[in-house]
């Protein structure tokens, strides 16, 4: 495959994922996981402000008791 074709394919995948997530068209858990993996595979990591947003999201999740020991 030509390098130009690889660049085009990469761009199409990125554009498609972005469109689907932003539009809510297919923003399912599996689609978000594909996007997460795509970012990870391309070395995209969170930075300062984004890390704070992830922390806030984590802290807003409900806590469940560990029922294994009860």
Image: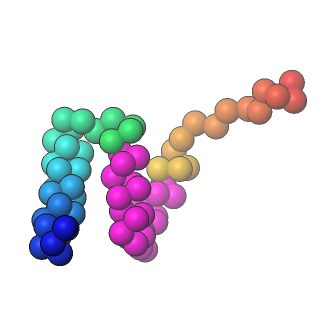
Viewport quadrant of the N terminus? bottom left
Q: Residue at x 36, y 48 (%)?
A: 34
Q: Is residue 15 above or below residue 70?
A: below
In front here: 55 or 34?
Answer: 34
Q: Which residues are magenta?
A: 32-56
In the orientation shown, which residue stands out farthest toward the right? 69
Viewport quadrant of the C terminus? top right
Question: In the rendered image, is residue 51 in sight?
Answer: yes
Q: Is residue 29 above or below residue 67?
A: below
Q: Residue at x 46, y 57 (%)?
A: 54
Q: Is residue 70 above or below residue 63?
A: above
Q: Quadrant of residue 42?
A: bottom left
Number of numbered labels in the structure image = 0
Q: Position of residue 8 (x, y in %)?
A: 13, 65
Q: Residue at x 16, y 41 (%)?
A: 23
Question: In the rendered image, is residue 49 in sight?
Answer: no
Q: Position of residue 11 (x, y in %)?
A: 16, 63
Left or right relative to 22: residue 42: right
Left or right relative to 70: residue 28: left
In front here: 69 or 20?
Answer: 20
Q: Quadrant of residue 20?
A: top left
Q: Is residue 46 magenta?
A: yes
In front here: 60 or 34?
Answer: 34
């Amino acid at each position: 495959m030509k390098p130009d074709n690889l660049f085009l394919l990469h761009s199409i995948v990125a554009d498609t994922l972005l469109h689907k997530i932003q539009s809510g068209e297919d923003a399912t858990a599996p689609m978000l996981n594909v996007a997460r993996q795509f970012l990870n595979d391309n070395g995209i990591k969170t930075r300062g402000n984004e890390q704070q947003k992830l922390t806030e999201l984590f802290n807003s999740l409900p806590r469940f008791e560990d029922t294994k020991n009860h």
